[in-house]
Each structure stands twice: as structure tokens, then as C-alpha cells.
Amino acid sequence: MADDAIRCDACPVLCYIKPGRAGACDRYANADGQLVRLDPHVVLERAVSRGDTLVPFLEKAREWDGALLSGEETFVTAIGAGTTYPDYKPAPFIISSEIAGVDMVTVVTEGIFSYCGVKLKIDTDRHLGAECSIVRAQGEAVGHVTTNEYGSQMLSLGGVRHLTGGSRHEGTATCDTLLSLCNRHAVELKIDDGATVIVQADKAPIVDGVQEERMRVGCGSATIGMFAKQWFGKVDEVVVVDDHITGVLSEHQAGKLLGVPESGIVLKGRRSTPGRYFRVAEPGTSWGGTNIDDPLSILGPFDREVARPGLRLLMVSTTGEHHAYFELDESLHPVEKELPAALRESVERIRENCEPALCTVLFMGGAGGSLRAGVTENPVKLTHSVRDALTRVTCGGAPVYVWPGGGITIMADVSRMPENAFGYVPTPALVAPIEFTLKLADYATLGGYMDHVRPLSSITSINRDEESRRRLAARPDNPWPLASEKRK
Amino acid sequence: MNNRSQIRMLPDGRRLHMHDGPIDMIVEAFGVVSEVEVAYRAAAARFAGILDELCGELAFLRRPASEDGDLPAGPIARRMLAAVRPYASRTFITPMAAVAGAVAEEILETMIAAAKLSRAYVNDGGDVALHLAPGEKFVVGMVERPDRASLFGTTTIEFCDPIRGIATSGWRGRSFSLGIADAVTVLADTAAMADTAATVVANAVDLPGHPRVGRVRACDLAPDSDLGERLVTQSVGELTPGEIRDALAAGIRLAESICGLGLIRAAALNLQGQRRVIGAQGRAQLVDIPVPDGSPVHA
């Protein structure tokens, strides 16, 4: 080239760029013989004129990690929106707001849920009641004990059978219990042939008058595995008492590996594998979720062939809450002594490793045909749209888990909703906030009430009765409802 | 993976933006979230090698196409050549006329091979490749001038339509044009076909030798342009209504002839406020329909 064009080597196109001109990319240019990157606002203007969203150019933009991410503005929750039951009418608020260039619609309604309840997770190893036992509130059956989870007892409360299938009293007590739990108030529950427990979302359970402090660090066997090294050399035998699996250091694989010698200890209960025992006692609310108050009651006489006087024995529960220290006398009987300082540390360590015990309340319900009709004239399309993740469902702005399969059956953590988000109707049934958020275009496609869509500004404008609205900051731990979902 | 290309989600969290050298595209897929992610990952993986692949054959791709002769090696280059060959005997054309559409098609096909999507589009600088599952449709907005975002109308493309490609060309756009059209928007079966046809039709909307049309040799602007010494339009002064009609008529004649060959399905030609449309049977909405908000595709 005879002129002063320069070759740009920013990419393999290798454009020859004349002075005052840009390359094929419009991003690199020849400024008086120098290759320059164009000022960012030039790129910005192009983006605007193309109708595209602005993208940082010269700033070091975050590389895409494959996830679908976020934006922010105002989101209207359904709390207090009212409802249109029995619902062929459009939902009370259908709100549009433009999010990053895409018109989004949030259909806001309060759903009346006959099919609904709560799943209650109570972090405790104490025995609250046998599986399938009836859970009562105000003397009425409101639910049952369901499958235990690791470190937690689980209750399933509410549901259509208790709400509307039983006596009037049963229905009212159930509705009352669900409402209190969902609004994060405390409720006393009595389990048939089991404990009385006071539960409240995000608070520690109180079992038979005793506030639970901690979740167990693990089962008895796991506790042995975790702490064997810290005990080694400081004590001759350790029993971790646990209603599920009681662990014995000298017999446990962890003790064997360290070379802990046999102690002659004899455990009651059924041996599962070496150093691991099932059912050393009955379930209860004392040591490690058993019914014992005297730890020695789970031991038989020491084996005289193996045991020796002076043998040091630590017995501890899986939370460290209960512990006792013994030494064998001349006749090989354990005699309780003060816990040596070296062992006190390990007991403390167990406690430290236990998470605070909490009650957590998940609201669970199904959005029925009539509720869906408040969103669209063709309700099954809403279901399909939720299923295809085109429509986002939230409860009071909190994220929900949508169960796979048919219908719109959701679970939501009430702790992530605004306070007092729930109400009731005398049916009895619970009134829960539910919001459906989707693109305006998709809303039209699924037969939405387009003529009822109103802009966010009509809800949030200052001169409209301010008092009838509650403005809340979004919880930072909730994904913004209008943002795209980040789901793996 | 080269370290030039930028791949990221736009702030709306739905659209994928991919940029490498002169390639700048917006991708959006619709469907189950997990499938969309699979599609985007596949698109990103394919995208990383595209510019190097094309530049490896750039000299060939900048030469005029012939109806027979050597085939390029790369799959995108082959798409480009296939799209421009039908025009090779009647006009000057190089495979570069189809580059944006062909790249869009390649990314789109990569995504639909990788994931189950209800709809998807790849918008490569205004050249758009579409995917529609049965029963699905796209509402496409159209601009009068590529340098302005205002839409003059919309058209709906449904599954049963043969159309899967949209392209717009004009002298105000990023690529050089030999004609004076503000914008020629073409609907065709593929994005590469649409890209080529939009270029050819926009070149044909012309008033040769008109004193108020400023023209410069392409090589004086960009020494390595495939247009060489051909005069490309740099300015168009105010034209009389008659002149505008004449220029549009020239473009329409060509558009109708290639529409008869099945190379395009419809075209809308814009010049200084006048518009001519062909092939719009059953799509009257191509002309002046109020634009709904949030049209997913800006063609």
C-alpha cells in the first residue's frame, strides 16, 4: 500500500485501515497512523441505536460463566393484592415493567389455597414421636410425623384432609396453625405418644419445655471418626451416645487405625459393624436423642479378661451437651470423676461443631385451576409456561421450588417472605401471595389479560395512596424476581 | 479458544452476546432453562473458532464467486459460497456478501443440534437466523434505517412459513453498498440467502450517475475490501419523489425476479420515506402496523 494505511493485528482479519477510518469491526481505527481502540461511548451509541442493551466495553467485563444472570428494579408482591376468587376474572394486579429492554409482566394475586400445608423441619435428635404419629394443635389433628432427616425431625402439617375433610374444629385449628407458622409466629404442637414441641420459623425448637441448642455434629459413629485423633492418648475409651448409631472408640475403625487397645467395654444394643451400635436405648429427649439419663445404663459389666483398673472412659452425646467421665476402680466398676481439662476441650469442640438448632417452615401448595384462570384465559398454558421456565413463580417475592410433574405445586421458605404475608378465609383455607412473572410477549401468547396490564408506575407513583402500600427492601438472599433464573 | 473473543450474557440475563473481531452477535434461545444453557454453551464453544476458520480462507472468500469451481474447506465458507452462487452469472458477488448470515446460521444450527429449543434466534449484526419448533412463531420488528432503532412495522414468522432468515442491507449500514437504499429487508429460507439477497437488492436500488449521490472507490476507504475499485455510496442528497420511485422500481424488478426463483420470500425496500414491498401475500402486516413493545428481534 502506497498510502499510510496501517495493518491492524487485533484479530485475524488483519484489516488495512486508512487514516481516519475504522476496521471491519468498527472498534479499531487508524488515528494519524496510530492504531487506536475507539472511545467507549462510540460503541455505546451504536448499541443504543441498534436497540441493544448496553454492554461495558473497555471496562474489564466479567466473562460469561455459562449462567443466566440478573437485573434490578421494583417488584410488586402479591401480599395484600386481594384476590378474585372464584376466579374467572383477571387477577387484581397485572403489572408490566421494562427490564433491560424486555417487557416483563408480573401477575400478582393472592391465592386461596385449600391444597396447602407446611413442611416443618425441626433440628433435633430428640425423639418427638414415632413416624406417622398424629400431630395435634389445640387438641385437633393438624398433621403427622414424617420421615426423619439427618439431624432433624420432620412434620407434615395441614393439607386438604385436615383443612376441609374433618370436623369444623379440626379445619379451624389446622388453618390457624398454618397461618401462625407461615407468618412466623410460635405454635405449640403435641405429638401422640410423643413430645410437646413449640416451633417457630427460624427459632430453636422447645421440646418438652427444654430449648434445643444444637444439631448433632454427626451420628455417634461419625463423631468417633471426627474426634478420634483428639482423644487419642488422653483417654482409653470413648462412647458417643446416639439414638441412631452409638460409637465406641476402641472398636471403631478410627480407633483401630490409631492403635487404641481393647478396653473390655460391653455395650447394650445391637452391634451393626465394629464400634457401631443400634438401639442402645429407647428414643427419647435425653442423651443423644435416647431416653437415658444415666449413660452407664447402656453398658454391661466390663470384660474381666481385658479391662484393667484405672481405665479412663469418656461418655458424650453427639452434641456435646451431655457428657460424663469415669475411671474403673479395682473391681472394674466405672466411677464418675471430674472431666479432665484435656477432654473438656474435645467436648467443647463437639459443641462448637454443632450448628444451631432451628425450626424451618416451608409453605407448600398447589395453584389450582381457578387461581390460574386469574392469570390467563387458558389456565393450562400457564402451567406449561411455568414448566418451561418462561414464567417465574414467587411467593411474596421469595423464590419457590416448583415440583416436577403436572400442575403448579410449589414450596417456599416463609422466612424469606415479608412478615405477615399470609392470610386466611373462613372456608377454611390459607391465603398466600403468589406472583407469576413473565415476558409481556409470552403473557400475550398464553392468553393473558392484556387489557388489564398496567404499568408499574401506576402502582408506585407517589400520589397514589401511599399508605395502602408497604415498601420493603428486597432481601439480599432472594434472587430478584424479575431477573433471569440462575439454576443448575 | 482464542483470547480475543468476548462471550457474556447481556444484563437482561436472557440474551447471549458474542463478539470477536468484526463479528458481533446477539443470541437468544427459548425453552427449558437447562436446554437453553446447553444451547448457549454449544454456541459459545462453536463461536470461539469461527473467525480463525474464516480468516484462513479470507483470500478465497473475497474473490468473485463462480457457478462452478473450487469449494472452500470450512463449513461456514461453504454456506457463504452456496448462498451467493445463484447470483454469480448475473452480477459481481463474492462469498463475503453472505458472511454474517452464514455465521448466524452456523451458530443457530449448533444450538439446535445440542439442545431442544422452542425458539431461537441469532442476530449477527442485523442478519438473523431463526429456529421455530412446531406451533411457534416470531414477531419481527423492522427498521426503516439501520442506524435508527425506530421500527416501521412488524411481521410474524410462523413455523409453517419457509422463512428462517432475515437480513437488512443499505448504504447507511456497516457494510459498503453500491446502491442508495436506506434499508432493504429480506425474508428468505436461510440467513445466508437473506444476507446475500439484501445486499444484491440494496445495490440495485440506485440512480446511476446521479449528482447528489456521493460515491467513493471502496479500496480508497478500505484497501482490502472485496469490492476493490467499485464505487460505494457514502452520501445521498435529497431526491425528488420521482427519483425515489425510479430507484425503488429498479430494486423491485430485481427482487421480484429472485423471488420468482425462490431465492427470497419477501422484501421491503426503503428509500427516503417511500417503501415498496414484494412477496408479502398474506403478510399485510409487513406494511405499517403499530409495533408492539418488546419485539424479540430487531432485523
Image: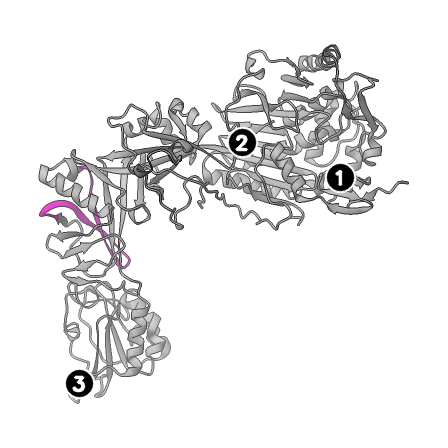
Quote the CA–CA distance across marks 2 and 3. 79 Å
- Main secondary-structure element of the magenta-colored stretch: strand
- Quarter assignment of residue B166: top right
Q: Which mark is residue B120?
A: 2
Residue B143 covered by magenta stretch:
no
Residue bearing mark 3? A332
Q: Chain of mark 3?
A: A
Quote the CA–CA distance across marks 1 and 3. 94 Å
Q: Which residues are magenta?
A: A137-160
Judge if badges 2 and 1 mark residues of a common chain: no
Q: Residues within 10 Å of mark 2 (few under 14, many from 20)?
A: many
Instruction: Looking at the picture, tell me which residue is in the foreground, B192 or B231.
Output: B231
A391 left or right, relative to A358: right
Residue bearing mark 1? A22
- Quarter assignment of residue B95: top right
| Amino acid of disc 1 | Ala
Judge if badges 2 and 3 mark residues of a common chain: no
Q: Which mark is residue A432?
A: none
